[in-house]
Amino acid sequence: MTTLSKIVLSVAANIAATDISFAQSYSLVPNDTIYMVGMMEDLETLSIQQQNITTDTLQLQWQKISESAPLLWEASACDNTICYTILVNSGMMNPIYPSDYGFLLLHITPHVNYGTAVVCYAVWDIANPAMKDTLTYILTVSATSGIAATENKNAFSIF
C-alpha cells in the first residue's frame, strides 16, 4: 500500500470516527420551531421537547439567544427542573433518562396588545457542547375587529 493511500485511509477513518462520536443524542419534538396564533389576554404555552434517543442519561443545558416581544407582554420560561418568572438567560435541566423527554417551554401572555413575539434559545448536551440546536418560539396575536358579519347563504323560512 502506498504512503498516499495510507494517509487517505487514515483521514477517512478519523472523519468517520468523528462523525459517530458527535452524533446528536436527542431529537426535537415537534421540531426546532413552534409557531402559534394566540388571543389577547390568553396565556399561551409554547413547548419544544428533547427526547433522549440514546441508552445513556443526558444532561441538557440551555441559553437564551434572543428575545423580541411587543410592549407589556409577559413571558416566562420553564424546563424540566423549574419554572421561572421571566425569560431567564440560561439553565440546566434535570437528567433525562433513555427514551424520556426534557422540555423547554414558554408561557406568554399578550394582555391587550397585539403583535408577534419571537424568542430563541440554544440547547445542547453538556457531553457534546459543540452540537447546539436553536429552538425558536413564535407567537402572533392579531388585533380584534369585533364580531364579523355573517352572510345568510343557507337561510330558510318556515311558514
Image: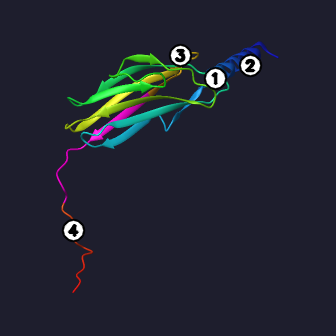
Q: How far separated are the C-alphas under marks 3 and 1?
A: 15 Å
Report the coloring of the rendering: rainbow
Q: Is residue 142 magenta?
A: yes
In magenta stretch: residue 56: no
The quarter of the image holding the N terminus is top right
Please, what is the three-letter code of the amino acid marked with disc 1?
A: Asp
> Residue most toward the right?
1
Q: What's the CA distance linking mark 2 and mark 4?
A: 73 Å
> Sequence-wise, which precedes: disc 2 or disc 4?
2
Question: Mark 3 or 1 closer to N-term?
Answer: 1
Q: At numbered mark 3, what does the secondary structure look like: helix, strand or loop?
A: loop
Q: Is label 1 or label 4 in front?
A: 4
Q: Position of residue 104 (x, y in %)?
A: 45, 28
Question: Where residue 29 sits: x, y (%)?
Answer: 51, 36
Outermost top residue: 3
Q: Which quadrant of the structure image shows residue 65?
A: top left
Q: Are marks 1 and 4 in contact (CB under 8 Å)?
A: no
Q: What residue is pinned by disc 3?
A: 129
| Badge 4 amino acid | Glu
Q: Gap between marks 1 and 2, in whole Å? A: 15 Å
User: Quick one: 8 or 107, which is closer to the camera?
Assistant: 107
Q: Earlier in the sequence, mark 3 or mark 4?
A: 3
Q: Which mark is residue 151?
A: 4
Residue that carries the numbered disc 1 in the rendered image: 19
Q: Which mark is residue 9?
A: 2
Which label lies toward us, 2 or 4? 4
Q: Secondary structure at mark 4?
A: loop
User: Closer to us: mark 3 or mark 4?
Assistant: 4
Marks 3,4: beta carbons within 8 A = no
